[in-house]
Amino acid sequence: MVAVMQKHYDLFLACAPGLEPLLHDEVLALRPVSAVAEPGGVAVRGGLDLLHRVHLELGLALRAQLTVDRSAATRLDHLATHAATLPWHAWLPVGANVTVRAHARGSRLYHTGAIAERVAAGIAVRLGPPRAGGSEQTVYARIVDDHCALSIDTGGEPLHRRGYRQATAKAPLREDLARAALIASGWDRKTPLVDPMCGSGTIAIEGAWLARGIPPGHLRRFAFMDGPLFDPERWRLARERALDKALPAAPPILASDRDAGAIAAANANAARAGVTADLDCACAALGHAPGLRRPPSPPGAVVTNPPWGRRLGGKQPLRPLYQSLGTRLKELPGRWRVGLVLADPDFARDVVPGLKSALMTDAGGTKIYLFAGTTRR
């Protein structure tokens, strides 16, 4: 059943730090009523179409949270009473297994466990007890300066989990960060893309989806699909329109890695993503990477996520690898764009002099940088 449609919905689209401007650009392409970049994400307002499309078409968001209420909050009993007055059945499925996560700062209510317990009790008044096998749903209660905002996690699983990456290699790069690296590198999505240290293929696969315009959320389900906000026909039409607009093929994308297991994972992930025909994956050490030894034409971009050192066992042993990458890049004919995902900025100088930091973000608690530039200035 579809809920009575509100004219507008307020969402906060959370992203990795530093990605806010890129996510804001993605959101604007969906033509929302409003979109404001804030620390940690983008606040967006739009109709039910937008609620569906942010899950289908955004590739840089980590979570989508639908704000359903804002109110003063100074007493626990009042918090429970107020939560029980809200029309949760308009947003969540009856019988859902609802987990409430609370955060408090600068407020008289500070015990997050008690806050979560009271909000959950209020929700249960309207939705009833959870049913066996009921939908898993998450509600956030954030109390700041004695005011509480209640929001629903409409995505469920983090949005970067597209559904294709079931096989991984060592220290894989998250899908949203791979996409951000491709965008920040300046790759035009029309010329060749090379990743000579591809691991499980995330950069190459995200590159194929970007180049062809394939919507990042088309393979998976989202938490809001179990409830009254979901309109199956609206989703079907949005998904069909997005896939119908996708290009039939990507420009040449050459991915390679010295690890045969990584290449097997990349091929399996590419098959699930539906881009096997777009990728040329080869098992080859950096010095024999096909994309660098026999580069396609015209010049395009080399975007890669080399070993970071801290995640795989030390910095100094990796310096020759980065210097070798720099040598290969200098040998490329023409002017290629370069994008490197690094945890240590010092390595950028070993590759191509003059690379600039285009993006700084966080991956699992590690600060990482995207250095970008060209092989010839």
Image (spheres, grey):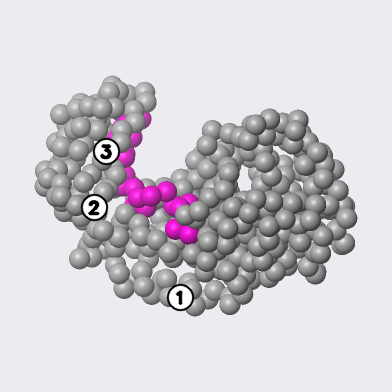
293 vs 44, left or right, is: right
**Res. 286 in view:** yes
User: Measured from the top left, where is residue 370 in percent x and y?
Assistant: 68, 44
User: Measured from the top left, where is residue 15 in percent x and y?
Assistant: 50, 45
Asked if residue 260 is among those painted magenta in the image, a careful observer would answer: no
**Quadrant containing the N terminus in the rendered view:** bottom left
Residue at x-position 58% and y-position 58%: 264
* Earlier sequence position, callout 3 versus callout 1: 3
345 vs 215, left or right, is: right
Residue 100: mark in rendering: 3
Res. 290 image quadrant: bottom right
Q: Pointers 2 and 1 in contact (CB under 8 A)?
A: no
User: Measured from the top left, where is residue 244 in percent x and y?
Assistant: 49, 78
| Residue bearing the label numbered 1 | 241
* Earlier sequence position, callout 2 versus callout 3: 3
| Residue bearing the label numbered 2 | 135
Q: Which residues are magenta?
A: 140-164
